[in-house]
Image (cartoon, grey):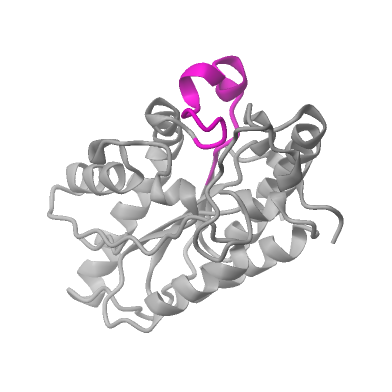
């Protein structure tokens, strides 16, 4: 199950083979050596608050699998504290785990690296991105999910290659950087789901102790790690966009990612 915002939708690429969904399904099918069914509920423009609608549509289902979540960029751009977003995310992960899902979350990338942002807005966005990523990582781990960090200097070193023409969303090559960062966490989640399925039966529904496995972090800040149906109000930072940039505002229309 693919949940989240435009990063999960893969806004910025043209070819289907370059999408997050194609990567996720292909990786799991290859690692698990079984057919994989993918469903994408992610929406461009979604915030963490809006993610709740996607999660609610998942937890009532009779079958469970692997949920892959990319969320947070729009929360960074909103005129509001980021801590409540991380708290919400932790609650969603806990609900999914309780319903029998393996959950993998990519913590917030460095939104301030986007060339579409003016320098002042970019500086603030970087600080808020870092804080949100740290809070997300702690919340996801506490809820029993797996988390990997999307923060990398590669996007600052090679923006012309790793961003699409709008200067805000990753290019196909940029998304491939994300894929490499997520590979280990996705594989482990798939393997854990197979083990659970062997015990719980084909539906993969929770058994005693489900949702309480050891959380795992991949490339997340040390301070955070301490404490897609895939089945086998200050001024908003959006005002800091450079002229001509066109971040997506679909979904719940609260932000550009």
Is there any visible trace of residue 99 in the rendered image?
A: no
Is there any visible trace of residue 104 in the rendered image?
A: yes
* Vertical side of 101 occupied by 61: above or below: below
Q: Position of residue 126 (x, y in %)?
A: 74, 36
Q: Position of residue 102 (x, y in %)?
A: 39, 62
Residue appearing at x 69%, y 66% in the figure: 87
Q: Position of residue 3 (x, y in %)?
A: 43, 60
In-image side of 27 versus 175 (left or right): left
Front-lying residue, 79 or 192: 79
The image quarter containing residue 168 is: top right
Quadrant for the N terminus in the image: bottom left
Q: Position of residue 223 (x, y in %)?
A: 74, 44
Count how many numbered circles sit on residues in the image: 0
- Residue extending farthest to the right is 234
Residue appearing at x 47%, y 64% in the figure: 213
Q: Is residue 199 magenta?
A: no
Residue appearing at x 72%, y 56% in the figure: 227
In-image side of 38 versus 47 (left or right): left
Magenta segment: 148-169
In-image side of 12 versus 80 (left or right): left
Front-lying residue, 75 or 202: 75
Q: Is residue 151 magenta?
A: yes
Residue appearing at x 26%, y 42% in the figure: 27
Front-lying residue, 2 or 257: 257
């Amino acid at each position: 199950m693919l949940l989240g915002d435009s990063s999960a939708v893969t806004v910025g690429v043209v070819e289907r083979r370059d999408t997050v969904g194609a990567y996720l399904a292909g990786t799991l099918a290859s690692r698990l050596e079984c057919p994989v069914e993918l469903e994408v509920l992610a929406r461009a423009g979604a915030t963490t608050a809006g993610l709740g609608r996607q999660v609610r549509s998942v937890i009532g289902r009779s079958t469970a699998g692997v949920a892959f979540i990319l969320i947070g960029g729009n929360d960074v751009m909103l005129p509001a504290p980021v801590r409540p977003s991380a708290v919400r995310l932790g609650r969603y992960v806990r609900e999914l785990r309780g319903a029998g899902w393996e959950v993998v979350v990519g913590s917030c990338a460095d939104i301030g690296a986007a060339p579409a942002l003016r320098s002042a807005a970019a500086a603030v966005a970087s600080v808020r991105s870092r804080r949100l990523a740290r809070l997300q990582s702690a919340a996801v781990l506490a809820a029993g999910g797996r988390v990997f960090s999307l923060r990398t200097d590669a996007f600052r070193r090679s923006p012309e290659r790793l961003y699409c023409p709008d200067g805000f969303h990753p290019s196909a090559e940029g998304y491939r950087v994300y894929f490499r960062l997520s590979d280990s966490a996705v594989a482990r989640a798939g393997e854990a789901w197979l083990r659970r399925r062997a015990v719980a039966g084909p539906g993969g529904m929770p058994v005693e102790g489900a949702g309480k496995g050891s959380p795992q972090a991949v490339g997340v800040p040390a301070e955070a790690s301490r404490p897609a149906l895939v089945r086998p109000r200050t001024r908003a930072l959006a005002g800091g966009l450079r002229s001509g940039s066109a971040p997506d505002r679909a979904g719940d229309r609260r932000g550009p990612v």
